[in-house]
Image: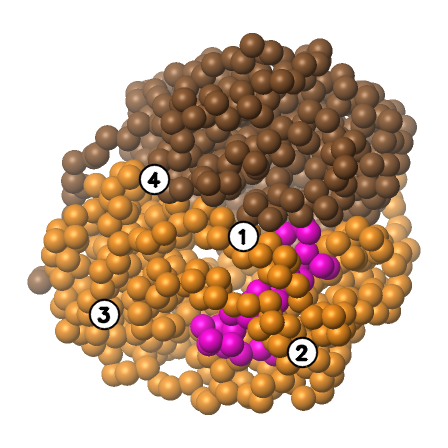
Chain colours: A orange, B brown
């Protein structure tokens, strides 16, 4: 299955991807800036994400909260998200409203700073602190988001520190930081703009030129430090966390090649054989046969710089001894190495992937985001159309080889959540 | 700040809207009574098959709450000659996962599969609905997993707040007071025999609807339906009517203790209205302005003005009988009282004066505009067709939705607020650090305060 892809670059460096499809009168506008928490300076953890919030606070021609209002009035949805090495923004709306989304994105790319105030920064800082409380601090196992990367990447590595940020660093963020971050990273030559859905390509090129053509190129994104690491951890790592939970949960992580590398696809299938769908190995053994777990999954982080992570994530039944959980999971991993991987289980994993792939591409927003991703990370959005074939080309032998290379004991990082000692709860009448 | 800058393109105007039509639904009934709906969406080579059975949690026997869901979850655990992982493996080798679940109204099975594999996938799906073997080991495993989930919920403030809100909102004898999935008291009572009996009583051709959406014609869909479901013969009964009596008719506060919690999970609301109420659309739009999307009053107030929270919203939950109307948010513990005050103010304001024409247009244009976005996938369309059947939504509802939303007047929306928001009956529930929160609520004059432990469920031992 192929989708239509046109791509070109404006003189100011903005990469543009167009994917026309007139099945429904919907258009998606999707912008990826090649900046994330990895680019934060010391003492400013969480800043890339806080900055994402500031992008919804208006720009030279757009009042506070008007970005949301204009898109919602136009009958569209919108949001943004921040990841370790990229930040994205999107609008999905009725196709006759395409230009308002381009105008809004261009206004904030060109003219954000005149709208920035201390009051807006203070408000969004508190909103983000509440986001942290909601998703990390007041959520069982919520700290895994920051503990696992901290365990798997060395302290000076850009992926080591917390994406949502510490309360202290969020408190320190200033308007000067906003201005510097904007000038450095929010430039056309550090962005990909994708339009997918119901539009006319010639018209869209004119609109893109009109709104983005005059925005000056930046001075160049400062290079990230060298992110290459040895192919495995080179030893066992282990952290045990007491948390307000009722059941132990184990995250077992492995260092693997970066996503997109030839070697990565076999590792991806390895993760799917282990932990995708319901007939996968972890579910069959730990949830069904041994009945010690209530859920068992495996997935990759899909990091394209330096190295990626494969993560096994198993939640025990309440009352199960944490060390029994650990032993059972490691037993399954060891079995992958000793017995290897069969044809049928690879076929199952690939069949699930193929259906999910087609189902995902039904939505204009998903197509746009996938194209922006390939353009940002691999500088070629047309790779999207070749991607499924790369998974399909992997043999069971290659998956077995990957298991024996990357699941080894000296490449395991254990993050184990265990229930706190029960506290006495006092109940007032 | 809306003045145009020199040399900068001014704010654009929208172009001409292009037509959108909800996909056509081709309905017929098989001779054995199975209702079939085929919805061609030929853009990509996939098909979603969804089965709706007219017996959900509403049909749970008293004391066995959770049975409908356990029955649905157990469907894919065995057919004759193929059990457990083997059966799941058969679906997955076809590139599909059969999802099975129940809600208040019905029980469901759904899969999405590449077009060339739809026939074998559908036959397998029909087999698990017609003749599941319910292996005792697997049923008991799923039951024990559900119990584990209920225990885990005690440590998870969001889900705990949702479930306890319903438990305190409805009269304890009402089915709606207890969650779809059951509770600590009832789930241990569920057995393989109970599951098989629920299936025998409620699953049959006359209570079943098959929805096929995707790259197929009405004729192909009809053939597939006949092959897979035409030979099924079994007498079954629909779930019973359901009632929605509230636990109380005055304002009250319930504080559920989670010591040292950095946030309070707040739920504020009352029993709402049934889905088929004639004011449905006016209520949807009214709720839109109140708290139905980002630019709504409650979110702008609590998040963008006061920064009390990461987000706040309101919703009416639509069921056959009256589901809850709820304002929900998570706020920093120290501002729980002030946040509650703002929520109460917004509910009162909604009833104190009509919205402006511009504000109404924002909500109506948003709802009408995002309508096609909700139906890009075969799975979403299948879910909507099944939901419409389960709730008795008229067939032309989706083809006329956008026009009717945009035709609503300020008076109609204001009347919906006056009629369907009841500040005098609000239940306020907070899961959080009650030692810190209770003093903030003293003197607010909201109503009597009850403090309970996380483990306390008011419907237990009723």
User: Of callouts 1 and 2, which one flags the residue occurring earlier in the amino acid sequence?
Assistant: 1
Residue B121 visible in rendering = yes
Label 4 residue SS: loop
Relative image position of residue A423 (x, y in whole percent): 88, 58
- Magenta part of the protein: which range? A254-282
**Which sits in the foreground, A377 or A279?**
A279
Query: Which label lies toward us, 3 or 2?
Result: 2
Question: Is A258 one of the magenta-colored residues?
Answer: yes
Question: Is A110 one of the magenta-colored residues?
Answer: no
User: Of callouts 3 and 2, which one flags the residue occurring earlier in the amino acid sequence?
Assistant: 3
Query: 10 Å neighbourhood of mark 2: few (<14), some, or many (≥20)?
Result: some
Q: Please report the residue visible at 20 percent of the width from the left and 47 percent of the height from the top.
A: A199
Query: 10 Å neighbourhood of mark 4: few (<14), some, or many (≥20)?
Result: some
For disc 1, the marked residue is A351
For disc 4, the marked residue is B43
From what the image shows, is residue B40 above or below residue B148? above
Position of residue B209 in the picture relative to residue A427 (left or right): left
Per the model, the C-alpha gap separating discs 4 and 1 is 20 Å
Query: Which label lies toward us, 3 or 1?
Result: 1
Per the model, the C-alpha gap separating discs 3 and 2 is 43 Å
């Amino acid at each position: 299955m192929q989708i239509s892809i046109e791509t070109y670059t404006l003189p100011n460096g903005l990469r543009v991807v167009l994917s026309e499809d007139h099945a429904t009168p919907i258009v998606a506008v999707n912008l990826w800036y090649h900046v994330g928490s990895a680019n934060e300076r010391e003492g400013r953890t969480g800043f890339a994400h806080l900055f994402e919030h500031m992008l919804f606070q208006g720009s030279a021609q757009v009042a506070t909260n008007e970005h949301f209002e204009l898109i919602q009035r136009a009958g569209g949805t919108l949001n943004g998200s921040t990841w370790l090495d990229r930040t994205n923004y999107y609008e999905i709306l009725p196709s006759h409203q395409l230009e308002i989304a381009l105008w809004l994105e261009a206004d904030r790319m060109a003219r954000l700073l005149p709208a920035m105030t201390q009051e807006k920064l203070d408000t969004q800082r508190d909103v983000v602190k509440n986001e942290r409380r909601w998703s990390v601090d007041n959520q069982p196992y919520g700290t895994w988001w920051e503990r696992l990367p901290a365990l798997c990447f060395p302290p000076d590595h850009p992926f080591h520190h917390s994406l949502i940020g510490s309360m202290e660093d969020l408190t320190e963020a200033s308007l000067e930081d906003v201005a510097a971050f904007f000038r450095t990273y929010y430039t056309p030559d550090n962005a990909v703009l994708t339009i997918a859905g119901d539009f006319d390509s010639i018209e869209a090129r004119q609109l893109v030129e009109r709104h983005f053509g005059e925005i000056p190129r930046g001075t160049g994104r400062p290079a990230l430090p060298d992110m290459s690491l040895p192919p495995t951890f080179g030893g066992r790592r282990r952290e045990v966390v007491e948390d307000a939970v009722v059941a132990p949960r184990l995250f077992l992580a492995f260092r693997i090649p970066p996503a997109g590398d030839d070697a990565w696809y076999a590792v991806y299938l390895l993760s799917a054989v282990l932990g995708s769908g319901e007939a996968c190995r972890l579910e069959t053994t730990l949830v069904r046969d041994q009945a010690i777990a209530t859920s068992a999954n495996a997935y990759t982080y899909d990091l394209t710089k330096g190295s990626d992570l494969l993560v096994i994530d198993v939640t025990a039944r309440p009352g199960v001894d944490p060390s029994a959980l650990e032993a059972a999971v490691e037993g399954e991993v060891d079995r992958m190495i000793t017995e290897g991987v069969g044809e049928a289980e690879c076929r199952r994993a690939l069949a699930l992937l193929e259906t999910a792939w087609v189902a995902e591409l039904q939505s204009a927003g998903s197509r746009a985001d996938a194209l922006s991703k390939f353009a940002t990370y691999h500088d070629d959005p047309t790779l999207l159309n070749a991607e499924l074939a790369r998974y399909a080309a992997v043999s069971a032998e290659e998956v077995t080889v990957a298991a024996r290379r990357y699941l080894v004991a000296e490449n395991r990082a254990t993050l184990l959540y265990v229930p706190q000692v029960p506290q006495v709860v006092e109940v007032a009448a | 700040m809306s003045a145009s800058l020199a040399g900068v393109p001014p704010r654009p105007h929208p172009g001409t809207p292009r037509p959108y039509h909800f996909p056509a639904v081709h309905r017929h009934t098989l001779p054995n009574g199975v209702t079939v709906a085929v919805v061609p969406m030929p853009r990509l080579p996939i098909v979603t098959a969804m089965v709706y059975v007219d017996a959900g949690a509403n049909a749970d026997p008293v004391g066995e709450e959770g049975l409908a869901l356990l029955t649905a979850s157990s469907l894919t655990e065995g057919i004759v000659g193929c059990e457990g992982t083997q059966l799941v493996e058969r679906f997955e080798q076809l590139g599909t996962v059969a999802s099975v679940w129940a809600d208040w109204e019905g029980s469901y099975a759904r899969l999405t599969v590449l077009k060339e594999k739809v026939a074998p996938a559908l036959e397998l799906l029909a087999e698990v609905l017609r003749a599941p073997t319910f292996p005792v080991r697997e049923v008991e495993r799923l039951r024990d997993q559900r119990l584990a989930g209920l225990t885990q919920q005690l440590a998870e403030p969001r889900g705990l707040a949702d479930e306890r809100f319903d438990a305190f909102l409805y009269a304890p004898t009402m089915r709606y007071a207890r969650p779809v999935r059951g509770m600590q008291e009832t789930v241990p009572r569920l057995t393989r025999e109970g599951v098989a009996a629920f299936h025998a009583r409620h699953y049959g051709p006359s209570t079943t609807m098959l929805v096929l959406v995707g790259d197929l014609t009405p004729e192909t869909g009809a053939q597939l339906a006949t092959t897979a479901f035409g030979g099924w013969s079994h007498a079954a009964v629909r779930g019973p009517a359901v009632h929605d009596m509230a636990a109380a008719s005055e304002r009250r506060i319930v504080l559920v203790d989670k010591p040292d919690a950095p946030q309070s999970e707040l739920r504020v609301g009352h029993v709402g209205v049934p889905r088929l109420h004639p004011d449905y659309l006016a209520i949807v739009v009214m709720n839109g302005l109140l708290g139905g999307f980002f630019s709504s009053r409650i979110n702008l107030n609590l998040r963008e003005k006061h920064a009390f929270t990461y987000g706040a919203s309101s919703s009416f939950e639509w069921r056959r009988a009256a589901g809850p109307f709820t304002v929900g948010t998570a706020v920093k513990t120290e501002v729980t009282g002030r946040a509650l005050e703002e929520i109460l103010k917004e509910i009162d304001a909604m009833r104190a004066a009509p919205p402006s024409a511009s504000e109404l247009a924002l909500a109506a244009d948003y709802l009408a505009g995002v309508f096609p976005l909700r139906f890009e996938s075969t799975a979403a369309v299948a879910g909507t067709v099944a939901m419409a059947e389960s709730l008795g939504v008229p067939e032309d509802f989706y083809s006329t939705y956008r026009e009717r939303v945009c035709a609503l007047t300020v008076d109609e929306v204001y009347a919906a607020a006056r009629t369907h928001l009841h500040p005098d009956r609000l239940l306020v529930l907070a899961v959080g650090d009650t030692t810190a929160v209770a003093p903030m609520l003293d003197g607010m004059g909201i109503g009597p305060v009850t403090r309970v432990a996380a483990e306390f469920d008011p419907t237990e031992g009723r």
